[in-house]
Structures are given as structure tokens and as C-alpha cells.
């Protein structure tokens, strides 16, 4: 991923240096097991650990000649460690190293994404409590519906990211497997005890049955979870973008003192960070389909998945980490305008109370169909003539004979819509 959309900590996980370091860890763990069970001579691992160094340029130079990355890696280590290094990789196949190492990189990345989500949850919880009873209009289809609170919006996001936290934990568990089972996965030339030892050493689970590779449904699940999280990011970003529109302006991204919004129009303060998140979310979701298509490989293995994973492994994780970090910044620093929220709530002159008016008429004995028709007539009048709905209702003797003035006034009070906010918050923040 380009440096503009990546952070150092997670980018380091996907560096060539770290990849080969993990390969060496896998090879050393396997050799330790083989020494323990007397499959190879004692002292191999101590020599390799002492003398073996990761030389990325040398590995690449050898690979250019042999056209095989694992052989190039082993050759480089052998050049440094000497003759004893010939016992490395005994009975193993390349995928034992590649797949186990790839899973370790996914686990390392997943843990960073988990930390990112936990930070977002902390911010959302704080903000949701702050704006718990801040009135704003709820919208459906982009049209004013009924009153809610800004806190409820944030609580909804909190609940969604709580689910995302559970998803990423499960996704990490799904790819926390190790396969050291040799060609086509039959353990023909390596003892299963070696795999068990390596798995424990590297804090993984043994893959119950591999072919020559770890089954790719595990990875498809992991990348699908990343795609879902990206969708959640975009949901929040889209809400922020809508609420920052000039005709709405209920909140705003933080705009620094020397920041510029437009090269042409000095007045512009654009929601560029949220728009950026919308774009990055598309990228992450775009990696899900290739991951799903990696499931169906030929027989016990082919390498059609390899080129896909060399791209989506780093890019999906690095991009999502950046997006989550940026979202946390936006949420923590956003500027909220409660007065504008209240002004917008009152903008439609009481139309948002039409449902309760209708329900009150039905309680008085009028059919729902007729009640709907009566209230709809006055809502149309209110909208077209720009007159408060309550004033039109007061002039209708049929309605006022069913609803007294005190009751009518109570219907047009938005605070009663918040009577169950505490109940909702208890469920969300239990």
C-alpha cells in the first residue's frame, strides 16, 4: 500500500524483513522439534540461531536465479550457518513455511486492528454519553422522520463496532493455525509431533487436516470480516458527510487553523477525511472477492492463490488499519452543533409528530385508514403553505373534539420520544 495510506507499525509486519524473520522462526521451531525427537542431530538450531541472519538483498539475488523464494531463503541461511543447516526443512514443503508464516502475519495484523477498534469503541462510548439527550431529527430516505438524539446515532455505531470487535477476534482465531505436514499433507516424511511442537512454540493451533496448504476458507473468512469492518467505517463516514452538508450542518470535521479546503474557494471546509474513508472502504471490500475465489484450488494445491495473497495480505490490513485510525481521529475531534440539530428538528413545523396524531385519532374510535387520511391532508397543507401543523389541527373541530388542547400540546413535544433512551443505552452499554 502507498505510504500515504499506511502506518509504520502494521507496515512493518508486511515488510520483507519481517516475512523472512517469521520463515526462519518456523524453520527453527521445526528443527528444534526434530532435535527433541532425534530426527536430526543435536546442535542444528543453535548454529542456525547464532549464525543465520536475514539478508533480504541476498535472498532476492538467489531467487532471481533459482525462481523459488523458499529455496532462495534456505540457500541464504545455509551460506551463513554452514553444513549443519542442511537439516533445516527436513520432510517439509514450501507451503508449510509460507502458510504458517502468512497466518502469523495475519494474526499480528489482526491484533493491531483489534486495538484500533477498541480505541474507536472508547471514543464512541464517551461521545454517546455526552450527547445522550441531544435532540436531533431522525431521517429515513433522507427525509425528516421522527426525533431521536445524537447520542443514539453514536450508540448505534458503538453497537456495530462491538460486533466488529467480536468478528475480528473470531477471524484471528480462524487463521491461528499451523501446518507442518509435508507434501500433500500426509506427514509421509515428517512426524506429526513436529507440527504439534511448532504450533505450541508459535502460539498457534494445528490444522486438523491440510492438503499441501492450509485451507483457504479460513483466509476468506478473515478478509470477509475486514470487508464488513470497512462497511461499518463507511457507514459512519457517510453519516458525517451528510450531516456536514451546508444545508444540514449539524456537525463538522475538525478543521485546523492553517488548513485549506479548496484551491479556488477560500470559504470551503470540506469533509475530506470522511470522503477519504469512503474510498478506502471500497478498496478493502474489493479484496474480499479474490479471497473467496482462493478457496477453490486444484486438487491438493496450486499457486493461483499466492499472487492474490501477496497483494491483499498487506494491502487489506494496512489500508483498514489506516482507515480505523483516521476514523478514531475524526470521531474524537468532530465539532457538534446541538443548536443547529434542534433548529433542523423544528424545520418542518411539526410534521414529524404526524404519527402520534394519527394514533391518537384511532384511540378515539376513528379507523386507522380515515385517521391517516385526515392527518395526511393537514401535513400536505402545512408543507405547501409553510404553516405550523399544530395551528391547522387546532382549527379542525372534528379533531379537537377527540383530542383536547393539553393532549395536543403534549403530542407536539419532542422530549417524550426520548423516554426509552436509558433503556436502549442499558442494552448497548451493558
Image: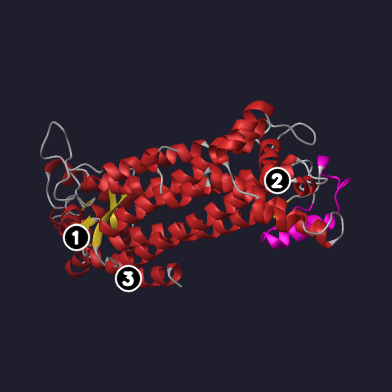
Measure the alpha-carbon separation of dots 2 and 1. 56 Å
Measure the alpha-carbon separation of dots 2 and 3. 59 Å
Q: Marks 2 and 3: which is nearer the front?
A: 2
Say the numbered circle drawn on residue 278.
none
Q: Is residue 118 left or right of residue 421?
A: right
Quarter occupied by the N terminus? top left
Q: Position of residue 197 (x, y in %)?
A: 77, 60
Q: Is residue 191 left or right of residue 88?
A: right
In depth, the one of 375 and 370 nearer the eye is 375
Give yes or no for contact between labels 1 and 3 (Cβ–Cβ under 8 Å): no
Say the numbered circle drawn on residue 338.
1
Q: In the rendered image, which residue does mark 3 sit on?
A: 419
Upstream in sequence: badge 2 or badge 1: 2
Q: Is 203 within the magenta?
A: yes
Upstream in sequence: badge 1 or badge 3: 1
The answer to whether residue 142 shows anywhere in this view is no
In depth, the one of 59 and 369 nearer the eye is 59
Dot 2 crowding, Cα within 10 Å, few <14, some 14–19, many 20+: many
Residue drawn at (56%, 44%) of the image? 223
Residue range (magenta): 183-208
Upstream in sequence: badge 2 or badge 3: 2
The answer to whether residue 283 shows anywhere in this view is yes
Check disc 2 and report its element: helix, strand or loop. Answer: helix
Q: Is 69 within the magenta?
A: no
In depth, the one of 314 and 274 nearer the eye is 314
Q: Marks 2 and 1: which is nearer the front?
A: 2
Measure the alpha-carbon separation of dots 1 and 3. 19 Å
Amino acid at each position: 500500500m502507498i505510504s500515504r495510506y499506511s502506518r509504520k507499525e502494521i507496515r512493518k509486519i508486511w515488510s520483507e524483513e519481517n516475512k523472512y524473520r517469521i520463515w526462519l522462526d518456523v524453520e527453527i521451531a521445526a528443527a528444534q522439534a526434530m532435535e527433541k525427537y532425534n530426527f536430526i542431530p543435536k546442535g542444528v538450531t543453535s548454529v542456525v540461531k547464532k549464525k543465520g541472519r536475514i539478508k533480504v538483498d541476498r535472498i532476492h539475488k538467489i531467487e532471481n536465479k533459482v525462481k523459488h523464494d523458499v529455496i532462495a531463503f534456505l540457500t541464504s541461511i545455509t551460506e551463513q550457518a554452514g553444513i549443519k543447516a542442511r537439516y533445516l526443512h527436513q520432510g517439509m514443503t514450501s507451503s508449510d513455511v509460507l502458510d504458517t508464516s502468512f497466518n502469523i502475519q495475519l494474526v499480528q495484523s489482526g491484533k493491531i486492528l483489534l486495538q484500533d477498534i477498541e480505541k474507536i469503541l472508547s471514543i464512541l462510548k464517551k461521545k454517546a454519553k455526552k450527547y445522550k439527550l441531544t435532540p436531533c431529527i431522525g431521517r429515513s430516505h433522507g427525509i425528516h422522520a421522527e426525533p431521536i438524539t445524537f447520542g443514539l446515532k453514536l450508540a448505534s455505531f458503538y453497537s456495530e463496532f462491538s460486533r466488529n470487535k467480536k468478528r475480528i477476534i473470531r477471524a484471528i482465531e480462524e487463521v491461528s493455525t499451523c501446518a507442518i505436514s509435508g507434501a500433500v499433507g500426509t506427514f509421509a516424511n515428517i512426524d506429526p509431533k513436529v507440527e504439534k511442537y511448532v504450533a505450541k512454540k508459535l502460539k498457534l493451533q494445528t490444522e486438523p487436516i491440510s492438503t499441501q496448504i492450509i485451507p483457504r476458507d479460513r483466509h476468506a473468512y478473515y478478509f470477509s470480516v475486514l470487508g464488513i469492518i470497512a462497511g461499518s467505517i463507511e457507514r459512519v463516514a457517510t453519516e458525517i458527510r451528510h450531516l456536514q452538508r451546508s444545508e444540514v450542518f449539524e456537525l463538522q470535521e475538525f478543521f485546523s487553523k492553517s488548513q485549506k479546503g479548496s484551491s479556488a474557494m477560500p470559504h470551503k471546509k470540506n469533509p475530506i477525511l470522511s470522503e477519504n474513508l469512503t474510498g478506502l472502504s471500497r478498496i478493502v471490500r474489493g479484496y474480499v472477492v479474490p479471497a473467496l475465489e482462493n478457496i477453490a484450488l486444484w486438487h491438493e494445491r496450486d499457486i493461483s492463490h499466492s499472487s492474490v495473497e501477496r497483494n491483499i495480505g498487506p494491502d487489506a490490513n494496512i489500508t483498514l488499519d489506516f482507515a480505523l485510525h483516521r476514523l478514531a481521529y475524526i470521531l474524537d475531534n468532530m465539532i457538534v452543533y446541538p443548536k443547529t440539530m434542534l433548529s433542523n428538528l423544528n424545520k418542518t413545523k411539526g410534521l414529524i409528530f404526524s404519527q402520534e396524531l394519527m394514533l391518537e385519532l384511532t384511540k378515539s374510535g376513528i379507523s386507522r385508514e380515515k385517521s391517516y387520511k385526515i392527518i395526511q391532508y393537514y401535513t400536505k397543507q402545512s408543507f405547501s403553505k409553510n404553516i405550523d401543523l399544530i395551528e391547522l389541527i387546532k382549527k379542525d373541530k372534528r379533531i379537537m373534539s377527540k383530542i383536547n388542547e393539553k393532549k395536543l400540546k403534549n403530542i407536539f413535544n419532542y422530549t417524550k420520544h426520548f423516554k426509552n433512551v436509558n433503556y436502549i443505552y442499558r442494552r448497548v452499554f451493558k
